[in-house]
Amino acid sequence: MNDVQAMERLGEARGQGLAAIETASSLEELRAAEVAALGRRSPVAEVQRSLGTIDLADRPRIGREVNRVFEDLRAAVAARRVALEAEAEADVALTDRIDVTLPGRRPPPGGLHPLTSTMRAVVDAFISLGYRVSEGPELETEWYNFDALNFPPDHPARLTQDTLYPDVPGDLLLRTHTSPVQIRTMEAQEPPIYVVIPGRCFRRDTPDATHLPVFQQVEILAVDEGLSLADMKGTLEAWARAMFGPDQRVRIYPDYFPFVEPGAGLDVSCFLCGGRGCRVCGNGWIELLGAGMVHPALFENTGIDPERYSGFAAGLGIERVAMLLHGVPDIRMFYEGDVRFLSQLARSA
Ligand code: FA5
């Protein structure tokens, strides 16, 4: 055999082989086409056997062509087998493969994350007292987060150790509390104002059992004629009892925030030790919120008449409330995403 004859044979072998493989309509027919195209008596195998009779100079070229034809035919067989097997699978009736009498698999019901349900419970408690929801941006200006709230220019909370300043143009920061929404609300609304403000806050706090760098607060603001410290105390105690039950002990004490005068803090007795003092609370009390009477400087900054109106405000941490409600000893557990923990506290929507 010379090289021209060999190339011709190989061309025919490829053409006929591919045609037979591609038109095989069953796995048996495919097997027969495979043997005919690739087996020991196939035309390609014959050319391979007679390579020795071909001129030495042409032999490598013809040898390479033999290999190429073998490969093409093998690939065609593999592709056709996959197609025929898929067809055969599809032909088996669905009822032969699936036991339709078996009960279905029930997907586990989803539930609200404990922080979502706590947030809703807190906001709902204030809505039931007549408050309306107000919201503001997480990316704030220095003015709303600090200046308008009467923070002096050198207040330590502004330092980069405490506040996160993103690398964007303008005097923007990630709000450290929900109090800037007090200013935005007083700018936008005339008294009487009764708002509840949920939102995420950001601080350069190192995570520990009671702190996270990203956490959630709820703020309340009431501005009306004749509001006094007694109204604030009554509102916060009513809320604490609605959330934690009538037996929860609450204490209110003087505290300082630049945007309130006088300022107050509210503690509740510890959920773990019942107020005796333990590793989580130290002295039997857990700090829950800051509060106070709205400072006249805020009224001046927002154009509300301080002679006519007075008001009170409070801000609390949702994670701390959820820890108390569920007896969770470490705030980080809410964000670890461990379903074994979360599913114990999940509420259906
Ligand atoms: C404030 O943020 C004031 N804006 C609250 C306020 C509002 C006072 C209105 C007066 C009038 P403070 O920094 O104490 O205050 O935070 C309030 C609550 O947020 C804390 O009691 C705590 O529950 C929660 N909190 C603060 N920092 C963190 C943190 N790193 N991780 C989790 N919760 C936090």
Image: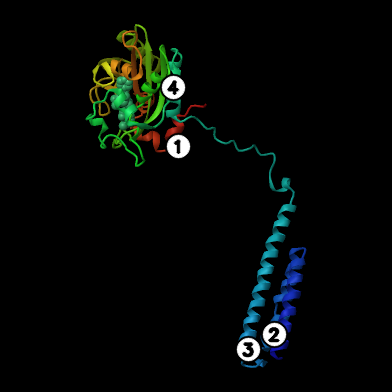
- Disc 3 versus disc 1: nearer the observer: 3
First-in-chain label (3 vs 1): 3
Identify the residue position indicated by label 3 in the image: 59
Q: Amino acid at mark 2?
A: Val
- How many C-alpha atoms fall within 10 Å of the one at disc 2: few (<14), some, or many (≥20)? many
First-in-chain label (4 vs 3): 3
- From the viewer's perspective, is residue 245 above or below residue 69? above
Q: Compare residues 21 and 142 and report the one nearer the observer.
A: 142
**Residue at (69%, 85%) from the top-left corner?**
47
Q: Amino acid at mark 4?
A: Ser
Which quarter of the picture shows residue 76? bottom right
Q: x, y percentage for residue 19?
A: 76, 71
Q: Are marks 4 and 3 in contact (CB under 8 Å)?
A: no
First-in-chain label (2 vs 1): 2
Q: x, y percentage for residue 88?
A: 73, 56
Identify the residue position indicated by label 2 in the image: 47
The answer as to whether callout 2 falls within 8 Å of ligand 1 is no
Q: x, y percentage for residue 313?
A: 34, 17
- Disc 4 versus disc 2: nearer the observer: 4
Q: Quadrant of the N terminus?
A: bottom right
